[in-house]
Image: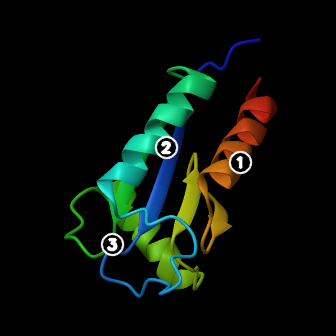
Amino acid sequence: MEIKHAIQVTIVDDSTGEKCDAHCGVDWSSAESISLVAKRIKDWFGNRIQLEYLDLSKSITNHHALELSQQVKDKNLSLPLLVIDGQPRISGPFDIRQLLDAIEAEVEIKT
């Protein structure tokens, strides 16, 4: 069975926030990291996934981004935050494998 709509994956982060000095986790504010994960997502899932990076340190202009920003504050969620179809999935540092595993679980649920 095929997914009826694309799954929206959003990585929410703050590029001005503290980073681990020991380079723990992925620096999602880096264009290289986003480019790499976009390629991996396309390799694994084709065009069924839409990836977005939301930097909370930048001015927020769209409704979806404002909702996510408010959710981070209201629920005291750690950044980076992985959101799939509007639902927080991983709060705090995560790597590409964990992101792909979370997407795969979502794909299985929706098919």
**Residue for badge 2:** 37
Could you tell me residue 10's position as x and y percent? 48, 52
Q: Residue at x 44, y 75 (%)?
A: 70
CB within 8 Å, label 1 to label 3:
no
Q: CA distance from mark 2 to mark 1?
A: 13 Å
Residue 5 in view of the camera: no
Q: CA distance from mark 3 to mark 2?
A: 20 Å
Could you tell me residue 73's position as x and y percent? 48, 83
Q: Secondary structure at mark 1?
A: helix
Could you tell me residue 79's position as x and y percent? 51, 76
Disc number for residue 56: 3
Which of the two labelled residues, at mark 1 and mark 3, occupies the earlier sequence position?
3
- Badge 3, how many Cα within 10 Å: few under 14, some, many 20+? some
Position of the C terminus by quadrant: top right
Q: Amino acid at mark 1?
A: Ala
Q: Residue at x 69, y 54 (%)?
A: 98
Q: Is residue 25 above or below residue 32?
A: below
Disc number for residue 102: 1
Choose top left, top right, bottom left or bottom right for residue 36.
Answer: top left
Q: Amino acid at mark 2?
A: Val
Q: Secondary structure at mark 2?
A: helix
